[in-house]
Every structure is written in structure tokens, then in C-alpha cells.
Amino acid sequence: MRNSRKYLFGSTSKNAFLFILFFAGILFSSCERDNEDPVGPNLQDRFGPFALVSELSLNRDSVDFAAGENVVFNAEFNKNVNWIITVIGLESGAEFTIEGFSRMINSENAVWTGRTSELPFFKAEPCSVELIVPEEGDFMETAEVTVLEPRVYSGSLYTDFEENPAINIVNPEFELTGNSGISSVITPAQGDFILLLEGTDNVVPNYFVGLAELSPQINGNEYVQFPTTVPKNLYFNFFMYNDGRPHGVAVIQFHFDSNDNGVFDDGPDQTFQLEGDYPLDFTGWRKFSHTMADVGISQAQLEKVVMIRVLLISIRDTQPSPKLEVQLGLDYITFTTGAPFQL
């Protein structure tokens, strides 16, 4: 029996040696785990009190985005938290928002290059900056930064309605209001002016309210100059405004000079437009982008687009009686290659 116990468990000294090795292994494993990143949520993050370690600061108090400068935000907390930084243009009303979950806010996760999260664009203007932690309701850090020059966006600008563009407002039935034309009665998506069409289909009930013809003479050209004439690679981009009135439709047409006389002739010249057009069933500014292939135009026809025409249509069948006004605002028409315009 004594020999069998020795065979099963070994001598007393050997057992002690094995016990020491086993205990050392546990201790070593514990030390290794202490040096590793914790598995699962950090208890301090979940239950520890929140504190601000370093206040919100910016790398500059004024910025020239057109020259390639940017704004870096910095702050530090005592634990990982959800945070939101919001920049607000004090003249334009533009907003840019960054959200994150971290303990540190720095150049790795909080840089502003002049973009806007939602229209309108920022202008050369003073801006307020707010840092909040949603779970800490009373917490807010603030700062200020001045935009000296706004961001220059990529793309070929057709018109932003800031200069004196070659625009012909057609109001044959006198159904457009006096606000129609180049206007600033609505806060623009970019700059200081927009194209506004507004009116009621009452005089002649045929759906048509009015239109604007945007000649390429806006840019001193006979035909529209595109950055590419490959329809599937050419994107048409613009910003459109509606005030929530639900009874309008915008139609944008591209006119091809069929007879090579350098002008648009209503009848012989061919017209292309997006199937389904643009329902005016929203509120505020929206960005629209689609390829020129979507309107069914060919590469050869793109080389001789002589006119862009914008029409305001009233959906008569949905209108109450008396009929309500319909409205559309248009701003910042651009063409881009390979991808839609990015805010």
C-alpha cells in the first residue's frame, strides 16, 4: 500500500516542488493578464464618475480652408465616453458635426476641413464650437473659430447664381410671383443668392407655372463645357430647396443643338430629362446627383448641349381649391467626374 501511494502521488518533497511550480504558474499568468488590455467593458468607464482632464482647445482661432488649413480639436476625459462636437456658422447657419467614443479628442479623431454635415455651406464667418457628452447632461465646453475663406469643393461649377448669370425667366401666363428670379429671400445653400421659382397654376390650368433658361453664356460659352462627355462618368449635381408645400414638381431639361446653329430652337432641338423628375415633397435644402446617362443622352449629344432649362410644375390633381403656391429654389449647379458631389 505504501508503495502504491508513492506511485500515485510521489514523495513529499516532489509534491512540494510541484505545488510551488503550479503556484508560480498561476502568479505568472495573473501578472501577464494585468499587463494586457482588459477583456470586456472597463468598470471605470461604466460606473466611475466623469471628469474633464483637459479642456476643449483648438489648434488655431482662425482658418483659411481655401489654402488647405484645417482645425484640430483637443480635449481629454478621465474615461472613454460618447462625445459630440458641433461647429455652427453664426451667419450661414451651417453645421458640421463630429461624433466619437474615446478618452482623448485629438488629430486622430477630430479634424475639420471646412466641410458641412448638412446644407448650407459655411461662409467666411465667425463660428461657435460646442463639445457635449450626452450622458453628462450639464456638461458643455465651448470655443470659437473664424473662417477666413471657406472650403473650395471639387467639381466643375456651372453656376452658383452669385454673378449676373445669363438667365431668362419665362412667365408666359403671369403665374410666377415677384419673388421669382435671382433671390436672397431664402437662406442660400451657398453664397448669397439662389434661383427661385414660385407661383400658382391658376390662370391657365395646365400644370405649368414658369421656367428659367440657364444659358451656357453664363460662362461665356456657346455650349455647356463638361469635365467629361462620357455620360456614365459625368455627374450632374445641384442643391434644391422646398418649403414643405407638397404639390410641386421640378423638371430639369438638357437641350441638344440638333441643327448646329448654336442656339436652342424649341421644336427641332432634342430635349433630355430625368424620368420621374424631382418631386417637391421635402423641407429645406437637399443635394441631388445623378449621371447624365440617367437622362438618356449620348456622348456626341453632350458635346452640343446648348441650354439647361428648369421648370416648375403644379400637380393639379392633388391641389385643393383654391390652388396653393408651389416653389423651388436652386443653387450651386456643378458637374463632377466619376462620383457624385460630396458635401
Image (spheres, rainbow, N blue to C red):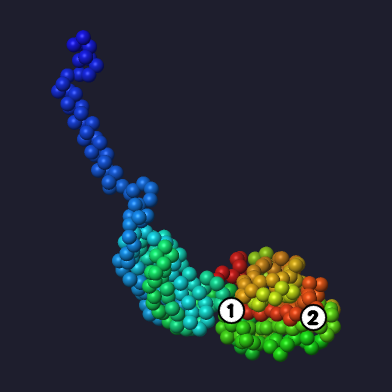
Residue at (32% x, 66% y) in the render: 52
Badge 2 marks a residue whose secondary structure is: loop
Q: Quadrant of the C terminus?
A: bottom right
Q: Residue 276's quadrant in the figure?
A: bottom right
Figure check: 44 above or below 272? above
The spot of residue 243 in percent (x, y) is 66, 77
Horizontal arrangement in the rendering, residue 292 relative to residue 73 (left or right): right
Q: Residue 303's quadrant in the figure?
A: bottom right
Seen from this angle, which residue lies furthest top? Answer: 1
Q: Residue 106's quadrant in the figure?
A: bottom left
Badge 1 marks a residue whose secondary structure is: loop
What amino acid is at disc 1? Answer: Ala
The spot of residue 268 in percent (x, y) is 84, 78
Residue at (67% x, 75% y) in the render: 244
Horizontal arrangement in the rendering, residue 257 relative to residue 189 (left or right): right
Query: Could you tell me if residue 150 is visible in this image?
Result: no
Residue at (67% x, 64% y) in the render: 232
Q: Nearer the viewer, mark 2 or mark 1?
A: 2
- Residue wearing tag 2: 322
Figure check: 314 above or below 19? below
Horizontal arrangement in the rendering, residue 85 relative to residue 315 (left or right): left
Q: Quadrant of the N terminus?
A: top left
Figure check: 20 above or below 247? above
Q: Nearer the viewer, residue 55 or 294?
A: 55
What amino acid is at disc 2? Answer: Pro
* Dot placed on the residue nearer the N-terminal end, 2 or 1: 1
Numbered mark located on residue 189 in the image: 1
The spot of residue 302 in percent (x, y) is 72, 72
Residue at (75% x, 86% y) in the render: 176
What is the tally of numbered marks visible in this picture? 2
The spot of residue 9 in percent (x, y) is 22, 19
